[in-house]
């Protein structure tokens, strides 16, 4: 055993248990792309300019395609209400559809059914 250990120390290439070489920085970088010539670079720039002009012309000719879609305020308010972490059982919320009492549980996700309409005749 001692002879084998001595042989491994004297000639590490003969050892059976060798460690893998440490990775170098080039192992983590993407493969190198060939250098672009000046003419190719100019051609890429011209193509990018042409595409930008095409998009600009398209937006001018058809502005209706690029108008933002208006959000439904009722839907936005409902989503905000369903995500409100501060609501506790018994809280009352007011919407365009009336007043509602939150009857859900804090340990469960909120649902539309967790909001029960308040009967205006019983409130004094």
Image (cartoon, grey):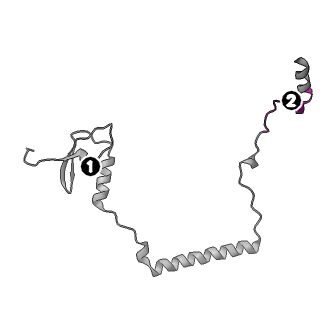
Q: Is residue 4 magenta?
A: no
Q: For the stretch drawn in magenta, what is the main secondary structure?
A: loop
- The front one of 59 and 113 is 113
Residue drawn at (33%, 43%), measured in percent from left and top?
Answer: 109
- The front one of 67 and 117 is 117
User: Which x, y percent locates residue 75?
Assistant: 30, 58
- Mark 1 and mark 2 in contact? Answer it, CB < 8 Å: no
User: Which x, y percent locates residue 46?
Assistant: 66, 77
Q: Distance from label 1 to label 2 (Cα)?
A: 70 Å
Q: Is residue 77 above or below residue 57?
A: above
User: Which x, y percent locates residue 38?
Assistant: 76, 72
Query: If the image is split into quadrants, where does the N terminus sit?
Result: top right
The quadrant holding residue 42 is bottom right
Classify 10 Å Cα crowding around label 1: few (below 14), some (14-19), many (20 and above). Answer: few
Query: If the image is split into quadrants, where does the C terminus sit?
Result: top left
What is the number of the mark on residue 32?
none
Residue drawn at (92%, 30%), measured in percent from left and top?
Answer: 11
- Name the side, left or right, on which 69 lies relative to 8: left
Q: Is residue 52 above or below residue 25?
A: below
Residue extending farthest to the top is 2
Name the residue beneath numbered marker 1.
Answer: 112
- Name the side, left or right, on which 87 lies relative to 60: left
Q: Is residue 13 magenta?
A: yes
Name the residue beneath numbered marker 2.
Answer: 15
Q: Is residue 100 above or below residue 6?
A: below
Find the magenta span and give its range: 9-21
Q: Does dot 1 land on a helix, a strand or a loop?
A: helix
Q: Count the numbered circles shown.
A: 2
Along the polypeptide, which appears first: circle 1 or circle 2?
A: 2
The quadrant holding residue 90 is top left
Q: Does dot 2 land on a helix, a strand or a loop?
A: loop
């Amino acid at each position: 055993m001692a002879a084998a250990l001595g042989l491994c120390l004297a000639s590490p290439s003969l050892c059976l248990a060798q460690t893998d070489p440490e990775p170098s920085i080039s192992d983590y970088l993407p493969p190198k792309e060939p250098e672009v010539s000046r003419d190719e670079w100019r051609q890429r720039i011209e193509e990018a300019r042409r595409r930008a002009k095409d998009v600009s012309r398209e937006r001018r000719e058809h502005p209706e395609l690029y108008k933002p879609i208006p959000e439904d305020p009722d839907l936005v308010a409902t989503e905000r209400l369903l995500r409100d972490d501060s609501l506790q059982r018994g809280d009352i919320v007011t919407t365009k559809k009336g007043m509602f009492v939150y009857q859900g549980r804090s340990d469960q996700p909120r649902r539309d059914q967790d909001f029960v309409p308040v009967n205006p005749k019983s409130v004094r």
